[in-house]
Amino acid sequence: MTRTSRRRFLGALAAGAAFATAPASAALATGAAPRAGRTLYLGTYGSGVGVAAYDPASGEITAQGTVDGVSNPSFLALHPSGDTLFAVDEQSDGGVTAISLAGGTAKVLGTRSTGGDGPCHLSVHPSGAWLLSANYNSGSVAVHPIAADGSLGAYTDLVTHDSPPPGPQGGPHAHQILTSPDGAFVLAVDLGTDSVYTYTLDESAGTLTPVSVAAFPSGSGPRHLAFHPGGGFAYVACELANAVVVCGYDRATGALTPGEPQSTGADSDSNAPAEILATSDGAFVFLSNRGDDTVARYAVGSQGAALQLLDTVPVGGTFPRHLALSPDESLLFASNQHSGTVTVFHLDKATGELRSAGPPFAQPSAVCALPL
């Protein structure tokens, strides 16, 4: 299967999943709070944000309901204060929604247009003053101001990735936007133009200024990146090339320099890596493999410059779109979109070994997990 046909195949599967039924759990009444354990928010292709509790010792998840009023909240992010949850509304008339969590309550504060089609990722600037979002279908990134109560203002900037020309993917497809570890630059990963864009953010005006563009081989489809905590390297999951790339990162200029593609541990051409993350001590990197339905485990060497593939671990579900670590990094959560489940693993911090925490938790169209 060629890279282009694989993209069409995966896109068709995702399109079908987008019309999946909303979570069947009882709706979480506004103002209600999870009853036990730590809180877990779940992004879905449905009509609300899933709410659950998890036991940090056993990893067991217990359903608590949903926060209604958000359409296809496929990616979630928390404000640094912990008082506001943000969700994308992944649809043609894209939006971002703010949900107040103050006082242990869940209250939708409102939705703002992203100015684009199909927002699939968002992040909060470390200042807590700006929300950054990526519109996949229209290939643009947006900036929204965050008010003191967590609500959002109209976007202050919208930048479309119109250069370099798109590769065989047919158009720009912004898939991720995040801030560098030191807060100096904003980076946007675009699967359609095979590029990672670096910007500076004017923290007074909320506008983005281009700084540099890192080019990946045509048709590689960079999707998400994760920084090594040292800040000098980043790891990029290339969806269409079925590869992971270690990149040098210049902290002074914000420039990213891609290295050679490396194995995901999945040889199948139908595999499409999705999420990548690094542990806070910089010892391990984990990558989700959709198609192979595994998590690839890497040891990090040379102070972040090298990855050694250790093994791949079956997720016990299908199409693991997203990975997340618990705050203490003792648990890893894999959201399996097509099986509608979330798998939890115990993580050995010394070896990076993943051990199943039990049967997967049922959550229809699970595509993102945010453990608090």
Image (cartoon, rainbow, N blue to C red):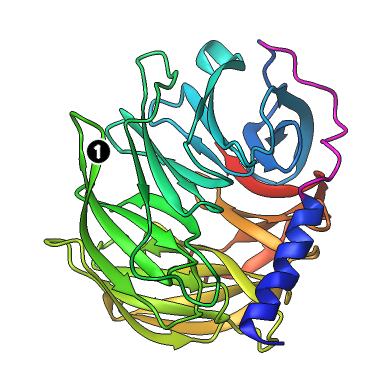
Nearer the observer, 232 or 245: 245
Secondary structure, mark 1, is: strand
Rendered image quadrant of residue 250? bottom left
Question: Is 265 displayed left or right of 11 in the figure?
Answer: left
Q: Residue at x 69, y 13 (%)?
A: 32
Residue 8: x percent and y percent? Answer: 70, 71
Image: magenta residue range: 18-30
Task: Decide: few, some or many residues near mark 1? Use Cα within 10 Å; few <14, some 14-19, many ≥20.
Answer: some
Q: Amino acid at mark 1?
A: Thr
Residue 207: x percent and y percent? Answer: 25, 38
Q: Residue at x 64, y 36 (%)?
A: 40
Question: Is 317 displayed left or right of 157 in the figure?
Answer: right
Residue at the spot of label 1: 207
Give the prevailing secondary structure in the magenta stretch: loop
Residue 370: x percent and y percent? Answer: 58, 41
Nearer the observer, 201 or 307: 201
Quick check: can you spot residue 330? no
Nearer the observer, 298 or 363: 363
Rendered image quadrant of residue 190? bottom left
Q: Quadrant of the C terminus?
A: top right
